[in-house]
């Protein structure tokens, strides 16, 4: 019996909705996409929300909306998926890469502040694996240095900071709808902002630069240079069916994460890495009940990670690395639009030791026990 790392939540209701869209013949962005956007906007409590083709294109669009380009610097963490850093060179800016904290794998706020120069315009912190960032600290840095914050919240739909859903805190927040996420459209992304001006520009940009205000008397009018970052009705139909169950899906993930925590807390050779609902939040000074992790990934630290990963997979249990340490990769080495700040010792340690365990809605306590039993045997 194979235990996958992740399994999308696909019900007959979702399949029926997809068939309905197929039979309608209206496959591109349309009323189903609008319903998906409106439903998620209400859930997050944000002012503006746009569905786009991916979190990567969402991050790029966010930088362009803030007029970031050649001569500007964008600070990002080293321990993240490459897209977080790649979007800066894509718009002609420099990606300045800094280390993370070993304890929670989030950006090191001291390293972040030390890397700020007069050319720094934006910081892109990552709420990795669904862990909320410390916006008390981030906002203090933002105000002190007059910066923008774009949160790479690819993993973080449903997470909360001090009782408020992620999606309202940053100037622009970007979520992913990739199948590794528990709300997925296959490929896709979400961009949120509280700014009317930024929302208007981004909505135009993702529609080829079209004037979306309806002010033109001559019908369609293209007021800017833009591109096509629209999410289709077909994709939105999948996400919309999942959104109807988002509270139950999130509650189940928290339950499963707590099960893992209870089974692994005192196991020799394992260090728990995630935010704990039961303890003081590791990311800020609030109490844990004021913040909520969305558990896109449940990861642990182990020695000899690659051997354990190989053996677990041979047993039919899909485990995975956490994510990547960017400075190790050619794309970010000897690149004039990339600057590595520091030795990245924490990022490298996280990369070598983090192990992601299976986590999905259909995962039962019995299957979790099998995962843990086989993991202990590997250790």
Image (cartoon, rainbow, N blue to C red):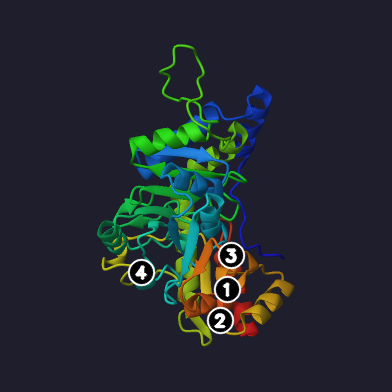
Foreground: 25 or 248? 25
- Rounded to the nearest angstrom, the CA distance separating label 4 from label 3 is 24 Å
Q: Name the residue under label 4.
A: 109
Decide: few, some or many residues near mark 3? Use Cα within 10 Å; few <14, some 14-19, many ≥20: few
User: Quadrant of the rendered structure where residue 214 is?
Assistant: top left
Please name which of the two marks, 4 or 3, marks the residue nearer to the observer: 3
Secondary structure category for the residue under label 4: helix
The residue at 59%/40% (across/down) is 238
Q: Is residue 67 at all visible to an observer of this figure?
A: yes
The residue at 44%/58% (across/down) is 74
Precedes in sequence: disc 1 or disc 3: 3
Rendered location of residue 316, percent (x, y): 71, 69
Q: Mark 1 points at which residue?
A: 355
Tell me whether the residue at label 1 lies in contact with that at label 2, contact meaning CB atoms closer than 8 angstroms: yes
Q: Mark 3 points at which residue?
A: 335
Q: Mark 2 points at which residue?
A: 302
Rendered location of residue 168, percent (x, y): 34, 47
Q: Quadrant of the N terminus?
A: bottom right
Secondary structure category for the residue under label 3: loop
């Amino acid at each position: 019996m194979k235990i996958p790392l992740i399994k999308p939540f696909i019900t007959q209701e979702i399949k029926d909705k997809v068939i309905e869209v197929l039979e309608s013949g209206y496959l591109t962005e349309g009323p189903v996409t609008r319903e998906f956007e409106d439903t998620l906007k209400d859930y997050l409590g944000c002012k503006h929300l746009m569905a786009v083709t991916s979190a990567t294109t969402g991050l790029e669009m966010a930088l362009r909306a803030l007029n970031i380009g050649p001569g500007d610097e964008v600070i990002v963490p080293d321990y993240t998926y490459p897209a977080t850093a790649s979007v800066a060179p894509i718009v002609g800016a420099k990606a300045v890469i800094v280390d993370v904290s070993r304890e929670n794998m989030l950006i090191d706020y001291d390293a972040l502040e030390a890397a700020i120069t007069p050319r720094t315009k934006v910081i892109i912190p990552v709420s990795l694996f669904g862990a909320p960032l410390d916006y008390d600290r981030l906002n203090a840095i933002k105000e002190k240095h007059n910066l923008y914050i774009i949160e790479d919240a690819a993993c973080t739909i449903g997470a909360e900071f001090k009782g408020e859903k992620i999606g309202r805190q940053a100037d622009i927040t970007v979520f992913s709808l990739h199948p590794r996420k528990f709300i997925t459209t296959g490929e896709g992304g979400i961009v949120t902002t509280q700014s009317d001006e930024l929302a208007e520009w981004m909505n135009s940009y993702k529609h080829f630069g079209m004037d979306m205000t309806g002010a033109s008397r001559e019908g369609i009018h293209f007021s800017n240079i833009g591109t096509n970052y629209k999410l289709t009705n077909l994709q939105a139909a999948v996400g919309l069916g999942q959104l109807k169950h988002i509270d139950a899906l999130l509650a189940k993930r928290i339950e499963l994460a707590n099960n893992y925590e209870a089974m692994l807390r005192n196991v020799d050779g394992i260090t728990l890495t995630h935010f704990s609902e039961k303890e003081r939040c590791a990311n800020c000074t609030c109490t844990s009940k004021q913040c909520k992790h969305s558990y896109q990934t449940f990861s642990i630290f182990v020695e000899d990670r690659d051997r354990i990963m190989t053996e677990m997979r041979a047993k039919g249990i899909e485990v995975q690395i956490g994510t990547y340490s960017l400075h190790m990769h050619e794309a970010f080495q000897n690149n004039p639009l990339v600057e590595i700040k520091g030795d990245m010792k924490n990022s490298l340690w996280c990369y070598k030791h983090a192990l992601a365990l299976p986590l999905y809605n259909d995962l039962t306590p019995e299957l979790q026990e099998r995962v843990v039993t086989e993991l202990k045997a590997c250790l």
